[in-house]
Image (cartoon, rainbow, N blue to C red):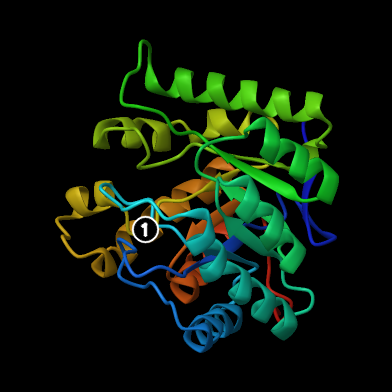
Amino acid sequence: MSARAFTMRDRRFIRGERTAVMGILNVTPDSFSGDGRLALSEAVKRAEAQYEAGADIIDIGGESTRPGHVPVSIAEELERVVPVVRAVRERFADWPISIDTYKPEVAREALAAGADCINSVWGASDELLDIAVESGATLAIMHNRELLYAGEIVDEVLRALLAEARRARARGLSEERIVLDPGIGFGKTPDQNIAVLAGLDRLVALGYPTLLGTSRKSTLGKLAGRDRPEERVFATAATTAIAVTAGIDIVRVHDVAATRDVVAVSDAIVRNWRPRTWTE
């Protein structure tokens, strides 16, 4: 099995043509990257900036997943994200919107407000799968677990993600609406994160659409000696180029404009992509 495309909001992204950029919109005050926004007008303005910078997809989240984060109630998360999803959908009719949540209640309401994809950091629960199937949404399934691995990290990540993908298909979700994310920075040591990044080609070889989120993460800070997340743009760019080389379909980032440049050059070399304005 090898999905030839992935679909969001009836937009079909052909795998291998170019790398899609997913812009991050945090609607939370405690984002690790310091870019959270709570006011609706500020959130919409940030979304507009991501769109103008060239984001193919916007990912809206209302609960931080940083180490030591304070959990948010369902009611609070709904209050944060649903108005933003609705406002962004009203502003951009055809722009694919992803909702960053693992809570079925939040996913359902966000989809009703105009979202197209559920991006779950805790894999695919049966309830999330049912919601995705019923709504026609795409489901991004991220690998996440406690720091206990019996075997080699890449083998375990791939085994777990393949099992989740097969569960999703058995539940009725088409392969074009299943996206696999290896979960860099989630339940993994810095060395394990590096090992997973080195094995991205093996993730792609599973045949499902893929997503990678390394943007501004602490492992990159350790490698580059950058304590502040906003100083990790170039380190993130390095992993983006590696992701394109490996065949990753979507990169999830804070810095969309910089990433578009990295993706454009990398796609030209690796995928033989050219911009519409290209002339010899």
Q: Nearer the viewer, residue 131 or 188?
A: 131
Whether residue 4 appears in this view of the structure is no
Q: Residue at x 46, y 19 (%)?
A: 156
Count how many numbered circles sit on residues in the image. 1
Q: In this view of the protein, which residue sits in the foreground, 152 or 144?
A: 144
Pointer 1: residues within 10 angstroms few (<14), some, or many (20+)?
Answer: many
In screen coordinates, is 238 left or right of 74? left
Query: Who's the residue at 59% across and 50% down the image?
Result: 119
- Residue 66 appears in the rendering: yes
> In this rendering, is residue 80 above or below 42?
above
Where is mark 1, residue-wise?
Answer: 236
Give the answer, above or below, for where 223 lies relative to 82: above
- Which residue: 14% across, 56% down? 225
Q: Position of residue 207 (x, y in %)?
A: 70, 31
Q: Residue 111: horizontal and vertical position, in percent?
A: 73, 60
Name the spot of residue 235 as percent of width and height, x first: 31, 58
